[in-house]
Image (cartoon, helix red, strand yellow):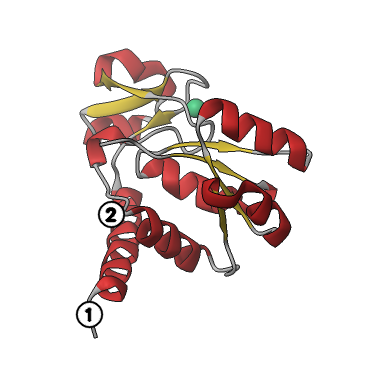
Amino acid sequence: MVERKFLADEMLGSLARWLRIMGYDTSYARDMADNDILSQAQKEGRIILTRDRQLAERASMDGMFIQSDDDAEQLRQVIRRYALYFDEESTRCARCNGLLSIKQRSEVESRVPPRVLERQEEFQVCSLCGQIYWKGTHWRDIRKRIALALDRARVDNSPR
Ligand SMILES: [Zn+2]
């Protein structure tokens, strides 16, 4: 199965972060002209996600026009259209799209608040920006939001 890769336009920063958390390689087009967005997407085999109808039309099959300005709804639409799934073990850095690698407590000791160190055993560190992640209480909320979007995308697909 081919893994989808995306390029989100400037208006879709939040959607880009959710897709990264779901494990999808998602670039973010900041300050980029339409032509550059199109050529980068083509070069890297990315689907353009955009709120600009004209840009989506130019991208044709490799673009998706995102109508809603609600991020839960945006995520639902993309999940539905590209049949995305969520593998908790393959999340990427929400901040920069880097790959995460698993680290033990001793390896991040000096960079994590003691409170967190006490409770968590496993951490993930971004290979590009160094951001440290752990699956604390906020992870439950993230998981819930993604599960909800997946559910709603599925309901939509069922025959009426
Ligand atoms: Zn990062």
Residue 87 is left or right of residue 38, and the answer is left
In the drawing, what numbered circle is on residue 159? 1
Which mark is nearer the camera, 1 or 2? 1
Verify CB contact (< 8 Å) between mark 1 and mark 2.
no
Residue located at (27% from left, 50% from top): 85
Within 10 Å of disc 2 (Cα), the crowding (few <14, some 14-19, many 20+) is: few
Q: Which secondary structure, mark 2?
A: helix
Above or below residue 56? Residue 121 is above
Residue 39 drawn at (x, y percent): 67, 31
**Residue occupying image coordinates x 24% and y 19%:** 104
Badge 1 marks a residue whose secondary structure is: loop
* Figure quadrant of the C terminus: bottom left
In the rendered structure, find residue 131 and report the number of the disc placed on it.
none
Tell me the kind of residue under disc 2: Arg
At label 1, the amino acid type is Pro
What label sits on residue 140 in the rendered view? Answer: 2
**Image quarter of residue 146:** bottom left
Q: Residue furthest top?
A: 107
Q: Is 104 situated left or right of 26 in this image?
A: left
Check the picture and name the quadrant holding the N terminus.
top left
Residue 131 in sight: yes
Does the image show residue 31? no
Query: Residue 54 lies in what quarter of the image?
Result: bottom right
State the separation of the CA atoms marked 1 and 2.
31 Å
Q: Is residue 124 above or below residue 89?
A: above
Q: Determine the residue positioned at 36% across, 61% down.
A: 80
Residue 8 spot, x, y in % from top left: 58, 45
Category of crowding for the residue at label 1, using alpha-carbon neighbours closer than 10 angstroms: few (below 14), some (14–19), many (at least 20): few
Residue 129 position within the rendered picture, expressed as x and y whole percent measured from the top left: 52, 22
Exactly how many numbered labels are in the figure? 2
Q: Residue 58 placed where, x, y %?
A: 68, 50
Q: Which of these two is toward me, 105 or 51?
A: 51
